[in-house]
Image (spheres, helix red, strand yellow):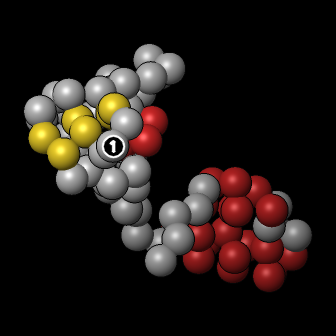
Amino acid sequence: MRLVDADKARECFGGDGVTGAVMQRMFDSLPTIDAVPVVRCRECKYHKPIDYCAKHKQTGWFDDDFCSRGQSKGGDHE
């Protein structure tokens, strides 16, 4: 499964005739996925070398892991 911007996809079919209108209705009827942005361990300000997490005070975390308390090193996600 891939998450896509259905509003942007809908704009691609600007209502040009029957096909465009059908495609717009199809995009409008697609289910919405309740997704939230996450901070991967490799991007987290608590991530330390050797896969150590200062927040959890544990090792064993991988770069692609994430948790609900992750905070971006850049500060753009809290």
Residue at the image position 18 percent from the left and 45 percent from the top: 59
For residue 17, what is the image quadrant? bottom right
Residue 55 x %, y %: 17, 28
Report x, y in % for residue 47: 33, 33
Q: Residues within 10 Å of mark 1 (few under 14, many from 20)?
A: few
Q: Secondary structure at mark 1?
A: loop
Q: Is residue 10 left or right of residue 44?
A: right
In the image, residue 25 lies at what x, y percent? 60, 72
Image quarter of the C terminus: top left
Q: What residue sits right under mark 1 in the picture?
A: 50
Q: Quadrant of residue 4?
A: bottom right
Q: Which residue is painted at 67% across and 69% down in the image? A: 24
Q: Residue furthest front?
A: 50
**Identity of the residue furthest to the left in this view:** 57
Observer-nearest residue: 45 or 5? 45
The residue located at (40%, 55%) in the rendering is 64
Please say if 61 is above or below 55: below
Q: Residue at x 50, y 20 (%)?
A: 74
- Give the amino acid at mark 1: Ile
